[in-house]
């Protein structure tokens, strides 16, 4: 299957700092990537859809000024959590859509980034 | 009605038994369907995709799709303790983004 990487795998930061998370598709080009957040024992929550070369589409309730997404190339999307606070502590997971024929595109997930804000 | 509903868990089966996971969805437009497995503390891992009505087998896993009934299932034969995880059903959606819509998942425990 296709491989998606994320960096860093975990990060601890002080309240008020910004954190950047990178998501890369290693063996395919992904015109669309997705960012999810997951709190303990809860479902995945889609935060935004990231399209290469255009602005991200954010889900309702997700602050676009706080969660900055950049999809500058077909293999890289970044999520920056600006002015992070303890309530932003969560497991952030990206996925990349590998193209298939017709409607057979498949999403592959990165390993996730565990963010802890002190 | 939730967009994706999965059988409520947790589900426990003895080692070697068949685990049956069910999922119904409301989006009639979806043409692709996925099952992901998520171990505790890890990200989801794709285990099966299915696009046509009927059965699709891959090793110990069999996915079944019935678009008319808006139903998709996953059978795990000869369940192993390593299969213990949360299983997520996800219709592929429609439109240009084709976002996945996840159910809340079914937690499976295979007892040795």
Image (cartoon, grey):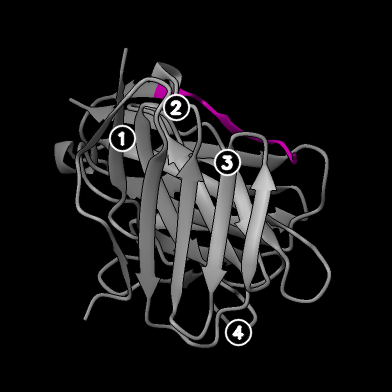
Residue annotated with mark 1: B108
Looking at marks 3 and 1 on the same chain, the residue that comes earlier in the sequence is marked by 3
In this view, A97 is above or below B37: below
Mark in the foreground, 1 or 4: 1
Looking at marks 4 and 3 on the same chain, the residue that comes earlier in the sequence is marked by 3
Give coordinates of residue A24: x percent, y percent: 68, 40
Chain bearing mark 4 = B
Magenta stretch? Answer: A1-10
Looking at marks 2 and 3 on the same chain, the residue that comes earlier in the sequence is marked by 3
Quarter-of-image position of residue A47: bottom left
Mark drawn on residue B48: none
Chain bearing mark 3 = B
Q: Are marks 2 and 1 in contact (CB under 8 Å)?
A: yes
Chain bearing mark 2 = B
Q: Disc 4 and disc 3: Cα gap in Å?
A: 29 Å
Mark drawn on residue B95: 4
Residue annotated with mark 2: B79
Q: Disc 1 and disc 4: Cα gap in Å?
A: 32 Å
Neighbor class of circle 2 (other Cα within 10 Å; few <14, some 14-19, many 20+) is: many
Residue annotated with mark 3: B61
State the SS at label 1. strand
């Amino acid at each position: 299957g296709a491989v998606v990487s994320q960096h860093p795998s975990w990060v601890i930061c002080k309240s008020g700092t910004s954190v950047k998370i990178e998501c890369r598709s290693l063996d395919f080009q992904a015109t669309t990537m997705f960012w999810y957040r997951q709190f303990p024992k809860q479902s995945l929550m889609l935060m935004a859809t990231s399209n290469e070369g255009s602005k991200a589409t954010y889900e309702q309730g997700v602050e676009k000024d706080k969660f900055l997404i950049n999809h500058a190339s077909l293999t890289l999307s970044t999520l920056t959590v600006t002015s992070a606070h303890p309530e932003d502590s969560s497991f952030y997971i990206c996925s990349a859509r590998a193209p298939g024929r017709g409607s057979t595109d498949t999403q592959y997930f990165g390993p996730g980034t565990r963010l802890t804000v002190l | 009605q939730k967009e994706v509903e999965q059988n409520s868990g947790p589900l426990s089966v003895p080692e070697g038994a068949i685990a049956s996971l069910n999922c119904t969805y409301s989006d009639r437009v979806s043409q692709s369907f996925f099952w992901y497995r998520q171990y505790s503390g890890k990200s989801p891992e794709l285990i099966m995709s299915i696009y046509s009505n009927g059965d699709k087998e891959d090793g110990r896993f069999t996915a079944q799709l019935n678009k008319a009934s808006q139903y998709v299932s996953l059978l795990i034969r000869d369940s192993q303790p390593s299969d213990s995880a949360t299983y997520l059903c996800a219709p592929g959606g429609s439109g240009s983004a084709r976002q996945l819509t996840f159910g809340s998942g079914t937690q499976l425990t295979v007892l040795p």
